[in-house]
Image (cartoon, helix red, strand yellow):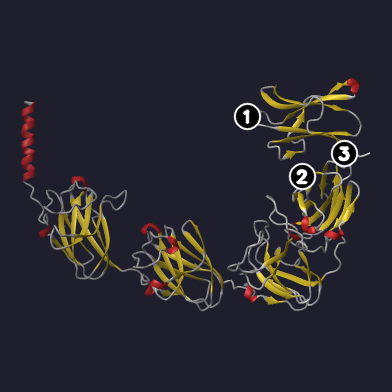
Amino acid sequence: MSSLWLAVALVVAVTSNALVAAPANDHFSAGLTLMGSPASTTGTNIQATRESGEPFHGPDDDVGNSVWWQWTAPSSGRFIFSTAGSNYDTLLAVYTGNSVSSLTLVGSNDDRNGFDTTSLVDFPAQAGIIYRIAVDGAYFRTGNISLAVTGPFLPPVNDNFANRFTLPATAPLVQNGTTSLATREVGEPAHSGLSSGASSIWWSWTPLVSGNVNLSITGSGFLPTLGIYTGASLDALTPLTASQQSIGQTETVSCAVVAGTTYALAADAASGLSGDVTLNISAIVEIPVNDDFDNRLTIVGSAVQTATTVGATLQSGEVLENFSHGNTLWWTFTAPSTGRWRLDASASEVIPFVALYSGTSIGSLSRIARMTSFTAGGATELVFSATQGQVFQIAVSSLSEFFSTTNVAGGVQFTLQLEGAAPSNDAFANSRRIFTSGTHIGNNRRAETGPQSGEAAISDSQLSDIGGSSVWWRWTAPSGVSTVTLDTIGSDFDTVLVVYSGSSLGALTVIAVNDESGSTPGQSEVVFKAVPGITYHFSVNGFLGAQGNIQLTLTGGGFVLEEELAAAAFESQILPFGNDRYVTVSYTRKTGKGINYLLEVSDNLIVWDRTEAQVEMVGLPQSLEGGASERVTYRLKTAVTHVFKKYFRLFVTQATP
């Protein structure tokens, strides 16, 4: 009974579907006419079929329930076809062509977004052209259709380069626009290097004054791009050199503009997105008259020189000095008389960075000296020697913001005048002689900034350039002396300390060099092994020409009793302490008065740690020989956690009698 009922039900169902006729517009040739715009109609694809030669209207080939309309564009412009209101997952395609087997696709869509399975096609139509509209169902779905067309939607007036809007010449200014329905022209460049843009609009701007300007473009819900060009036609555009920054939905471009020059500005966006945009052009910061080397000002007499770094730039071809912001101003100075000259820029609003050059063009400059104080309101004085008629080029900028919180844009002021006598030991030939250990007082005020004739600039892995404002001492190592320490701790400026051997300024060999001691910022300290009878030359420099009072201290003038593992019973091993293991070193030492022991640690037998920062004593010394000697044990402060090598050496010294 149950089986019989199922059979009857199946027969009835089939008979019922057979009574539903195919839609009147099932075939391409029977497409219904949709008139004008806006316009709308309804229909169904239930019982619709796919014709022989008919294209698939969506991304898959499992469709076959299409119905057709035809529509003649009443005018040119962008039109939108939509199946919004249909009660199933539709497919929508628009074609041109006169037969179902010779169609050209204009546009198609399955789902208008991830939440709406109805379809939308947006395309530029031409007046009088007949367009064929097919509505199908995804994955054989069928149902009732709502079809509508709206438009025309015209592109922005400034869609094409030839129709760009002219902006006011004065700045600042704000200009609103939209890239919706905008297009990309044939031959149009990729703005900001973004080749995926496809909806650009254009402006034309001719500024009244020259200077630096910031331009920003903000997009509504998308990241826009901004292109800046010179050129009178789309195929002859030259992009402007500019720095760009994108933040969120805004792109900012900074560049220099020239009064009277016409610039083409283009707004676009990534991935074919579009929408409302706002263009902002800031006030133009005029470039100082002596911003470029070729426009440098001539210094006459001893008048105060004043200017501002606001709007100043780094000229093309100019070498950016370390620590300089690069907003350079230029002067030229011809020495009216022979002597030592002092340039004092201490009264500047910014922390000035001063550089002195020889040369006649921006590409042929040779630096003589440079100077900055690193301190707001600090002394910035550059001293140099000149012969009558000698020509110098002077560059004044500000200290890079990386080294200071002081503004990098502001007023600069300096004076240039003959200087008084230099320190007596300014020259290598007039170096002061040191006879004993201890502290020696001096200064490098009014010392010549930059290396003196024949003096080499020194550099190492920590220092970029030293050799400014140097003064000199010399010391001959006495018999028995070995390891000595030399420092400038107590000086009141940022010093650089260099130890040389050699007999003349042009034939010196660097023994040791230091800028920062590690224990005292701004002060210098070196340790070196002196050879008895050798004369060593000590140069105290100011970092970047800094000047002030000097305290130079020489210690360790004793002589070596034993050296490098010469102490009795020197041994090392790894011993456990608690749950960890440590490298330990034990040795026997005498307890006589004036005898000093120095344990050094190294990873590579080249660099030795002369302090006890890495080691600590274990327990108390063990008295031997009735107190004449003692056994001591030291260990590395860091526990052994992996395989590694450590090297030790021991210096035993006694003070000079």
Query: Which residue does the numbered mark 1 point to in the structure image?
Result: 643
Q: Position of residue 434 (x, y in %)?
A: 89, 51
Q: Quadrant of the N terminus?
A: top left
Q: How many marks?
A: 3
Which residue is found at the position 76% from the left and 51% from the top? 510
Task: Give the alpha-carbon distance from disc 1 to disc 2, as whole Å.
Answer: 31 Å
Asked whether the viewer can see residue 219, the reply is no
Q: Position of residue 575 (x, y in %)?
A: 70, 23
Viewer-nearest residue: 84 or 236: 236
Q: Quadrant of residue 267?
A: bottom left
Viewer-nearest residue: 198 or 446: 446
What crowding class fits label 3: few (fewer than 14 Cα within 10 Å), some (14-19), or many (20 or more)?
Answer: many
- Give the answer, above or below, for where 516 lies relative to 233: above
Viewer-nearest residue: 460 or 634: 460
Mark 3: secondary structure: strand
Dot in front, 1 or 2: 1
Mark 1: secondary structure: loop
Query: Which residue does the numbered mark 2 point to in the structure image?
Result: 519
Where residue 559 is drawn, which disc sits there?
3
The answer to whether residue 465 is left or right of residue 16 is: right
What crowding class fits label 2: few (fewer than 14 Cα within 10 Å), some (14-19), or many (20 or more)?
Answer: few
- Pointer 3 and pointer 1: residues touching (CB < 8 Å)? no
Which three-letter amino acid code belongs to the residue tagged 2? Ser
- Give the answer, above or below, for where 330 lies relative to 564: below
Where residue 622 is drawn, which disc sits there?
none
Mark 2: secondary structure: loop
The answer to whether residue 92 is left or right of residue 656 is: left
Q: Name which of mark 2 and mark 3 comes first in the sequence.
A: 2
Asked whether the viewer can see residue 319, the reply is yes
The answer to whether residue 42 is left or right of residue 274 is: left
Q: Position of residue 111 (x, y in %)?
A: 27, 51
